[in-house]
Structure formats: C-alpha cells, structure tokens
Image: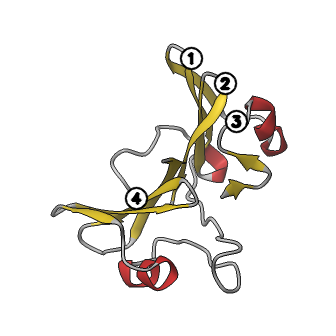
Amino acid sequence: MRFGTLRFGDGYEGAAFLGRPERFAWTQGDYCELLYASGGFQLDFDHGKFAYAAFFIGLDSYLPKHPALAFSQPRLSGCTPNNTALTRDTDRALLERLFGEADSMDIEPLEAILYYTRKGVTMEFEMDGKSGGLKRWNLYPK
C-alpha cells in the first residue's frame, strides 16, 4: 500500500518525486495539505508524516477550488489484473469484483461510500448517488 515510493508515515521528502504541489496549506497546527491539482490528487501530512491521500475522479461539490484542477485515473497495481484504472465509470460492482464485499457502507440519496481496510490502510470509495460512478478515492492508515 504505497503511492509510487511514498508510504504512510513517510516524511515530506518521500513526496519529492512528485514535484512541487500547486498549493500547500497548513490547516490545523502541524497538519498540512499538498494539492497536486493538475494531477487530480491531494496528500496530507500530520506532524510531518504522510497521513492521507485523496484522488479526485469525478464531479463532487467538495472538490478543491483551483484553476488547474484535473480529474485523476489512479491505477491499482499488485492487487488487480492489468493495472486497473479507477475512473468515473468505476461502479460498485467493479469494486466488489476487485476487493470483495465492502467492510461497511454509508448509503444516502446523493452519495454512497464503500469502506475497505487492507494491509492497515482504510480505503473510502465515494460514489455518486445518481450515476453510481466513482467520484473520489480516499486512503489513510487504519
């Protein structure tokens, strides 16, 4: 469970291979957000350690406001055949084929969130309530 060479708990220098983020913000005390808008993702660090990743995959009212924001299509490696890409066409059925039944779900009219924990990492898949397509993929240590 890593992003490139970056693993949860690594320091800021672990994200150096990604280049400079389009926005860096301290949000609370020693917690900061690095927005890679053109790549469609955000990395958060808590007390200097990698603590959270979000991939922006489809339209959502909670997307960061940035002119360079693009949608990402992260590829899963090592757990799926042919490096499967997550796109806004990814639906619950595909996630269940890849990961099995969700550990838990939060289903509301406008959004459904599927939760999985694998290798000490919690994955949240935020699905659009109307289309059923994937909007966002969040990851953080359990």
Chain-order first, disc 2 or disc 1: 1
Q: Residue at x 58, y 60 (%)?
A: 119
Label pair 2/4, CB-CB below 8 angstroms: no
- Residue 77 located left or right of residue 47: right
Chain-order first, disc 4 or disc 1: 1
Residue type at mark 4: give it: Leu
Number of numbered markers? 4
Label pair 4/1, CB-CB below 8 angstroms: no
Label pair 2/1, CB-CB below 8 angstroms: yes
Label pair 3/1, CB-CB below 8 angstroms: no
Q: Secondary structure at mark 2?
A: loop
Within 10 Å of disc 4 (Cα), the crowding (few <14, some 14-19, many 20+) is some
CA gap between label 3 and label 2 equals: 16 Å
**Which tag is nearer the camera, tag 3 or tag 2?**
2
Residue 86 appearing in the image: yes
Chain-order first, disc 3 or disc 1: 3
Q: Which residue is mark 1?
A: 30
Q: Secondary structure at mark 4?
A: loop
Is residue 65 depicted above or below 108 in this figure? above
**Which tag is nearer the camera, tag 4 or tag 1?**
1
**Which tag is nearer the camera, tag 3 or tag 1?**
1
Q: Which mark is residue 68?
A: none
- Where is residue 2 shown, x and y percent of the image? 69, 55
Is residue 113 depicted above or below 5 in this figure? below
